[in-house]
Image (cartoon, rainbow, N blue to C red):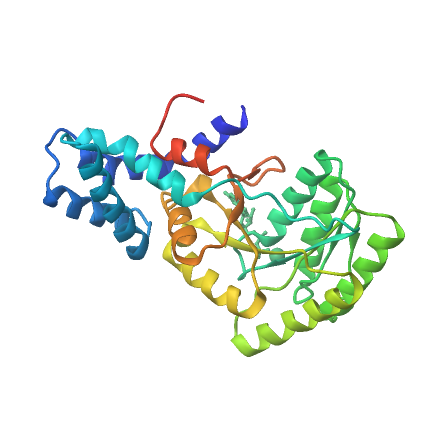
Amino acid sequence: MGFFDKLKAGLSKTTASFMDKVTSVMGFRKIDEELFEELEEALITADVGAETAFALVEALRKETRARGLKEGHELQPVLAELISARLGEPAPLSYNPAGLTVILVVGVNGVGKTTTIGKLAHYLKSQGKRVVLAAGDTFRAAAIDQLKIWGERAEVPVVAGPEGGDPAAVAFDGMKWARETGADVLILDTAGRLHNRADLMAELKKVRNLLAREVAGAPHETLLVLDATTGQNAIQQTKLFKEVAGVTAIALTKLDGTAKGGVVIGIKGAEDVPVKFVGVGEGMDDLQPFDPQDFARALFGSHEA
Ligand code: GDP
Ligand code: MG
C-alpha cells in the first residue's frame, strides 16, 4: 500500500464521520444562511474546534459571494481548498546544519511517545540518518524496556540509565554516545507525568538547559506527541506544552482508530504549531510525514491519488 492509500485507510473513520456530518450538510440544497450555520455546527462536532469552524465558515461565505456560488454541492471543493490553505505547506523536520540534531519528545502518558520514537528512528534510518535513542522516561522500568525493544526493531542503539534515574543524566549520556559514534540524530524520550505543571516544567527545563549547553541550538526540534482519539484535549495539551516546553512540532498518533482526525485542522488553526508526522498504526512503517494536501483530500474521501 502506498503512503496516500495508507493514510486514506487510516483516516477512514474520520472520513466517514466528516462525510456524514460535514459533507452531507452541503448536499442537494440551495446555499443560504441556514446552511452556513449548520455547517459551522457540523465542523465543531467533527472536532475542528469552535474557533477554526467559525473562521472556515466565514471564509466560505466570502468565497460564495466572490464566486457567485448557488448550490450546496459547489461548496465542498471550496471548503477542501480552504482547509488545505489553512493547513499550509508540509513542514519538514528541522535539522542542525552543523552536526548532531537533537529531538526532544514530550507529551502526556499513553499518547504514543515511545512508539512514535521507534517509528521515527526507523523512518530516519530509511532516509540514511544514523540515529541514537535515549531513554529519558526513567519513571518506570517498563518504559525503558519498551524503548530498548523499539531500538532492536529499528536497529538503532539505545542509551539508558537506571529506573528512577535523572533524565538529564540520560540525555547527557545519549549525547556523548551520539557524538562518539558520529550519529546524525539523537531522539530523547521523556516521562509524561502531569501530576503538576511546575514539576513537569522544572524537569523539562533541566533537560533543555543541558541539551543547549552541550550542542548549539539543541533541542533542534521539540516534538509534542498527541493522541488524535482525545479530540479537543489535544488542543489543550498543545497550549500547555507550548508553555512549559517550547514545542516546535507535533506528531499526531492513532489516526487509524478514531473518527476525530478533524482535530488536525483545529490544532493548526488554534495553536499554529505544525503537524510534522501522523501515526496510522502500531507498526514500524505506520508513521508518515504529514502532507496537508493529502490529508485534505483523504478527509473528503477523494479517489484520486
Ligand atoms: P507513551 O506513554 O506516550 O510513551 O505511549 P506509548 O508509545 O507507550 O503508546 C501507548 C499505546 O498507544 C501503545 O499501545 C501503542 O502501541 C499505541 N499507539 C501508539 N501510536 C499509535 C498509532 O498511531 N496507532 C495506534 N492504533 N496505536 C498507537
Ligand atoms: Mg513511553
User: Residue at horizontal 39%, vertical 36%?
Assistant: 296
- Residue 196 seen by the camera: no
Task: Depth check: give the residue in front, 158 or 207.
Answer: 207
User: Residue at horizontal 11%, vertical 45%?
Assistant: 33
Instruction: Report the number of discs.
Output: 0
- Residue 266 seen by the camera: yes
Quarter of the picture holding the N terminus: top right
Where 55 sits versus 30, above or below? below
User: Residue at horizontal 21%, vertical 37%?
Assistant: 66
Q: Quadrant of residue 298?
A: top left
Q: Residue furthest bottom?
A: 198
Q: Position of residue 269 (x, y in %)?
A: 39, 52
Q: Residue furthest top?
A: 304
Q: Quadrant of residue 130?
A: top right
Q: Quadrant of residue 154?
A: top right
Quarter of the picture holding the C terminus: top left
Task: Depth check: give the residue in front, 276 or 55.
Answer: 55
User: Residue at horizontal 44%, vertical 34%?
Assistant: 293
Where 299 sits versus 162, above or below? above
Task: Depth check: give the residue in front, 4 or 162.
Answer: 4
Q: Position of residue 280 (x, y in %)?
A: 51, 39
Q: Residue furthest front?
A: 66
Task: Depth check: give the residue in front, 274 or 168.
Answer: 274
Q: Name the side, left or right, on which 240 lies relative to 41.
A: right
Q: Name the side, left or right, on which 35 lies relative to 9.
A: left
Ligand 2 quadrant assignment: bottom right
Q: Position of residue 188 (x, y in %)?
A: 69, 57
Where 196 sits versus 156, above or below? below
Q: Position of residue 47 (x, y in %)?
A: 33, 50
